[in-house]
Amino acid sequence: MGNASDREQKHIVSSENGGTGAEEAVEHDETVWDVVVVGAGPAGASAAYAAAVAGRQVLLLEKAELPRYKTCGGGIIGPSRDSLPPGFELPLRERVHAVTFTLNGRLTRTRRSKKTLFGLINRPEFDALLVEHAQKAGATLRTGVTVSRVEQHGPAVPDRRTVAVVTSDGETVLARAVVGADGSASRIGAHVGVKLDQVDLGLEAEIPVPDPVAEDWAGRVLIDWGPMPGSYGWVFPKGKTLTVGVISARGEGAATKRYLEDFIARLGLAGFEPEISSGHLTRCRSDDSPLSRGRVLVCGDAAGLLEPWTREGISFALRSGRLAGEWAVRISEAHDAVDARRQALNYAFAIKAGLGVEMGVGRRLLSAFERRPGIFHAAITGLRPAWRAFADITRGATTLAGLVRTSAVARRAMETLDRRAASRG
């Protein structure tokens, strides 16, 4: 995977050639990709698939070799499932039918469902399958490639319809449109000027357990509303391995680490050696953060797109990636900056009208949850409508935004939470 094929090589112009390589690219259109996608996670693979299935020449660049590990709970809720390519078979490790809720280890209550609530996957195999679908649709994959920057002006750029993607080893890849899906520490996001207003630290351990322990967790997850404002922990079973993690605001590193240690200990899992221990920063965009610059779009974590309360990101990655791929196709066809800008604005509108509204509701929930986690725990464990809403959202029957828009009860509940949060603010 790490070596480019002959077909790929002719699409790459070495930056050491200076103007000569750029001039050659102008003379031979086949040396310019329609769409280059940076990052082969769920967002990038979805973008590459959407552009490739439209019949465009697509190059997908990934700095790691695949499959690779990612810090992630691996929950696949309804909106994620509904955003997968046709024919995609989820590599589920568990189907969840029950959720145990605790409030910092206390007030344990388990809610059960006859129907599957959501599924659990391991990210390495899930991401690799998404990339395979993009390749089957016609996208070309190159792994082991680190992108250092993109340029839309200067000697590496042959004309105003072209973007130069510069790699760390000096290669320049030319494209009519670029999609940045290179994660929360995105180089492409920096180029676009992505602005953030929420950064959180997630810590996670993959803990192999013996059969009796695995059987006790089969089909059931645990969610613990944590000790720091806005924090929570989770246990997601995947066969003979438990994914155990916590998340809290960045800047509380020592307290977050202590929360994870205490969480594991009170679950009776401290005696088992983690196979993997990892950490990851999640970043939410501000409302006025740009989603494009010129012929460059960003999606998924690179754009700061995730649900602020739960920090769920897979569904946001899949949905924004698909939209980015579709609009990148239109940008690649744009013959001038005005038309490219129009298509980029259409992409931003599509994101804000859907995922942006969901993020707005998530921010309101997080604000209330930070101040009154006990109310959330009491509602979801004791009130049937709250549990039904949780189940409907995880299954994909609705979204946070859809629930607030269509349910008078949900709207009144949100207004009450807003007032109580404000009164304690």
Image (tube, rainbow, N blue to C red):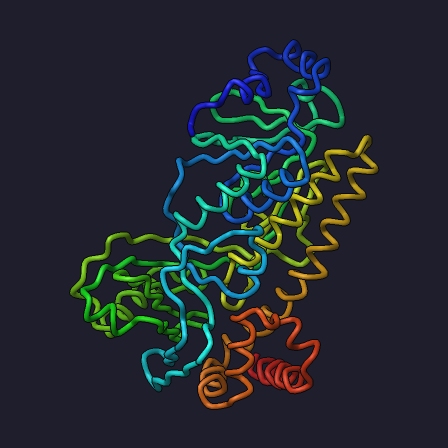
Quarter occupied by the N terminus: top left
**With 225 as the anchor, is 30 left or right in this view?**
right
Could you say where residue 175 lies in the image, as x and y percent from the top left? 65, 28
Q: Residue at x 72, y 37 (%)?
A: 294
Can residue 192 be seen here? The reply is: no
Q: Residue at x 57, y 78 (%)?
A: 425
Could you say where residue 18 lies in the image, as x and y percent from the top left? 62, 12
Could you say where residue 215 lies in the image, as x and y percent from the top left? 25, 71
Eyeballing the image, is 411 above or below 356? below
Query: Residue reaching furthest front?
Result: 87
Could you say where residue 49 lies in the image, as x and y percent from the top left? 59, 42
Eyeballing the image, is 160 above or below 281? above
Q: Residue at x 67, y 65 (%)?
A: 357
Would you identify the image quadrant in which residue 68 lies?
A: top left
Q: Residue at x 35, y 63 (%)?
A: 245
**Front position in the image: 68 or 16:** 68
**With 165 as the anchor, is 73 left or right in this view?**
left
**With 379 as the anchor, is 285 left or right in this view?**
right
Can residue 264 be seen here? The reply is: yes
